[in-house]
Amino acid sequence: MGAGIALAFLLFPIVAIFARVSPGRLVAQLSRPVVTDALVVSLKTSGIAQALVLVLGTPLAYVLASRRFRGRSLAIVLVELPLVLPPAVAGIGLIAAFGRLGLLGGTLDAVGVRLGLTQAAVVIAVAFVASPLYVRQAIAAFEAVDPNLVAASRTLGAGPVRTFFRVVLPLARRGLAAGEALSFARGLGEFGATIMFAGSLQGVTQTLPLAIYQEFDRLPDGFTTALAMSGLLVVVSGALLVTLRLVLQWQPSRPTSRFLFAPSR
Amino acid sequence: MATLQADFTLPLRAFALELALDVAGTVALVGPSGAGKTSVLHVIAGLAAPARGRVSLDGERWVDTARGVSLPPERRRVGLVFQDYALFPHLSVRANVAFGAGGRAVAPLLERFRIGHLGAARPQELSGGERQRVALARALAREPDVLLLDEPLAALDAHTKTEVRHELAELLRQLGLPTLLVTHDYEDAAALADEVGVLVEGRLRQLGPPAELVARPRDAFVASFTGANLLRGRARRGDGALTTVRLESGEELYSADEADGDVGVVVYPWEVSVARAHAPDADSALNVVRGRVGSLVEVANRVRVRVGPVTAEVTAASAERLELAAGGVAYATFKATGTRLVPL
């Protein structure tokens, strides 16, 4: 009974997004410029941010997983901190660091870089908030690789780099993919830090969540558009979740498959 | 043949591994688990860095702490076969063997190890014996100058083990590489190696040809590890050439060895005869231990019989003729010259 109520409570708002307005009208809303602009901004900034997360987060995770040094636990806690930070705090932090009046603001200004109200600011906000999910999962994935296999690779003549690409990465790839899916989903939904650090400029920094918020403010007409964009994000997030589960459940071929064609006795 | 020289100290958790060893031919290190055997292989392969010492192959320095030299594993030409084989689960058998081959063809190697038909299979699909052959082929594909084997036979069941041991001995002979293998099984060591070292808590207790370890075990541990019976007692010089040892059980034994004080009487199972009755006048063996028959274990065409505290090895035929059965009383007899006395 209690479980039923809990499940209904979790599902009801999601169902409500699709139940309020007919599917035809929702789909029609998706062609409005405010939606297409936001979709392009979201995909572009998320794509760049996730590329940065993979390129920078993977070596960081590997070092944290494979080296033992003083302060390692502290480093892991610090890496995970943005995960639990309130988005408003993350936004203020980014402004205090990279904003025009921030610690690096003067330096950036001197070399002619203005981050405020640019897509670069969106990318930074998304990467800052979403990367811990990837790094955390990647550390776990790297730690799960049998150290004997790494040692075997080295004694077979492969240096650390070749060992990483031929042994460690293939064996950790499922965990890395799972972490990346989580990070992507989190980044796509980023709201607080983005609106504070990058603003909400249609076609420039306005991502889907920001556009939803803006349209929702434009009652009553905007509400349908907000619903349509919300429905789109539900579908994308749901697809990511299903992909994640499939990736985690997928097993490499097992010897059992050999016996499928064994002669019957 | 090349010579691998190792002389180093490696601090481990409970003790320091201190070892000086020259490997030409096949050397086996035996010892209980936790003695530091695997760590020896890791230092030589470059997977662990010793606190002090040198490792070199025919003058080519791999490690010299005094000069700050320590080559990474990939620059030492070693073939290391891991205890659980450490085959790459994401690669086929062929790709595993080709991993260290540097582009050389691996087909002849696969054929040589009778795994040619398994080239496309994953390691998970193989039997223990097949995995072991893949691991050996992979290590040799690198064309190493030194071969290191970590418990090469431990992961095999008793049935395949004897056969594989035979094959391995033949392979090592053909390769002619300096080979260091570690095992907890003295029989494996004696069957495979020219020299056996007994390693206990990081120190070599004794190093020598297998026959010498059996003939002259330096201490009680070496004796019992090489498969001898060890009976504890107190030795006293007799009037004649014999030493009398009073066992803790009160029985007295005689040995041709000289000793005083607390000693272990060492006697190998094949020196012990078993009888259902004791006839002192009809037997040249001076030592008699009476006891109940414990376990009877068949080993090839022989039977290992436990009589009281003593294990004897008799032919299956005599075991049958004597109608030995667990629980019955029997006499284990052995000559005074068949015993060694070691300090405890």
Image (cartoon, rainbow, N blue to C red):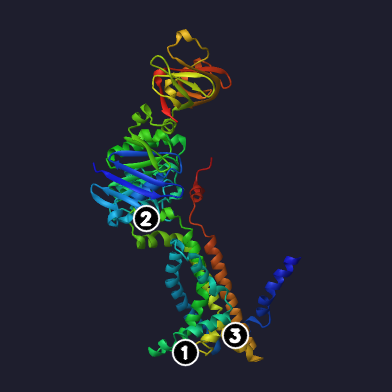
User: How crowded is the residue under tag 1: few (<14 C-alpha within 10 Å), some, or many (20+)?
Assistant: some
- Is residue A76 visible in the rendered structure shown here? yes
Q: Numbered disc 1: what chain?
A: A
Three-letter amino acid code of the residue under disc 3: Ile
Label 3 to label 1: alpha-carbon separation: 28 Å
Residue A176 location (% of width, % of height)? 48, 66
Residue A22 location (% of width, % of height)? 66, 82
Q: Numbered disc 2: what chain?
A: A
Does A196 sit left or right of B158 as displayed? right
Residue A116 location (% of width, % of height)? 48, 89
Q: Which residue is mark 2?
A: A153
Q: Which residue is mark 1?
A: A100
Residue B108 location (% of width, % of height)? 29, 46
Label 3: state its secondary structure. Answer: helix
Upstream in the sequence, badge 3 or badge 2?
2
* Residue drawn 50% across the image and 69% down it: A134
